Amino acid sequence: MPDAPVVVAVDGPAASGKGTLARRLAEHLGFAYLDTGLLYRAVARRVIDGEGDPADGAAAARAARALEPGDLAGEGLREETVTQAASAVAADPGVRAALLDFQRAFAAAPPGGAPGAVLDGRDIGTAVCPDAAVKLFLDASPEVRAGRRVRELRERGSNAIYAAVLRDMETRDARDRGRAVAPLAPAEDAFVIDTSTMNADEVFREALAHFDARTTSRK
Ligand code: DC
């Protein structure tokens, strides 16, 4: 029987650098990559498009059950209204349950027959893949993360205001960390990297060294 796929969980709050790291690790290792935040964003988009309320758990869970792969390539998934709504729908246990199978199936049988999968999100190491071979948790101060997000938005042509971005980020962090089901938190066995004063190359090198140490010791 072929070896079971190697699963890498990358969790952390918004703008901690987890997306950049996860994509880069997947590319370097030849693993499949899943941005699980996109699933919650696509559910939020469906609720908004149906003129529903993202805080209405039953409507959100219906949208999650109706999700189709094409929704992940939908327009405007990174808009601020969708961002906040994604965090709201993510608090509903029915939504989380509906998305669990898709994420676990991706990790168990990575598309394209890849030998492993990198999943980034908030609860990969704690709830989706608690047996992941490698668990990384990225963090940074709210001020640093808001500064990164402002730069990113300005590069895309928006005249983002730092104070507003910081406030929105803190609202979302509080909701993601405070929800009853699968809140944002490092797994007990996660390797935590504070990226506040690191650049993307430094984060990548540190994460890869941890990956190598974990996977070599398992052989
Ligand atoms: O990673 P992101 O910013 O695209 O995620 C959008 C929202 O989705 C986030 O505020 C919380 C939710 N989310 C989650 O609850 N669990 C995940 N594994 C990924 C995202």
Image (spheres, grey):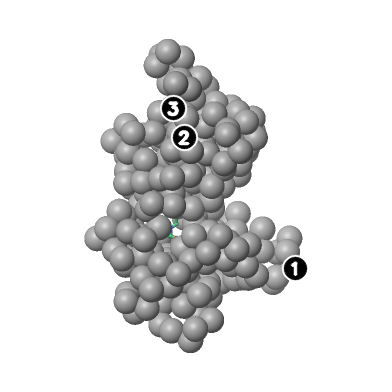
Ligand 1's image quarter is bottom left
Q: Position of residue 33 (x, y in %)?
A: 57, 43
Q: Tag 2: Cα neighbours inside 10 Å, few (<14), some, or many (≥20)?
A: many
Which of the 4 quarters of the picture holds residue 179? Answer: bottom left
Q: Secondary structure at mark 3?
A: loop
Which of the 4 quarters of the picture holds residue 197? Answer: top right
Of residues 65 and 10, the one nearer the viewer is 65
Label 1 vs label 2: CA separation? Answer: 34 Å
**In the rendered structure, which amino acid carries the disc numbered 2?**
Val
**In the rendered structure, which amino acid carries the disc numbered 1?**
Gly
Identify the residue at image location x=48%, y=22%: 2
Relative to 156, say whether 29 is above or below.
Answer: above
Q: Secondary structure at mark 2?
A: strand
> Quick check: can you spot residue 6?
yes
The answer to the question of whether label 1 and label 3 lie on touching residues, with beta carbons closer than 8 A, is no
Relative to 125, say whether 74 is above or below.
Answer: below
Horizontally, residue 161 falls left or right of residue 157, namely left
Q: Hey, which residue is sitting farthest front in the picture?
A: 1
**In the rendered structure, which amino acid carries the disc numbered 3?**
Ala
Instruction: Read off the residue under disc 1.
Output: 157
Q: Ligand 1 near label 1 (Cβ, under 8 Å)?
A: no
Circle on res. 8: 2
Identify the residue at image location x=46%, y=63%: 40
Q: Position of residue 24 (x, y in %)?
A: 63, 37
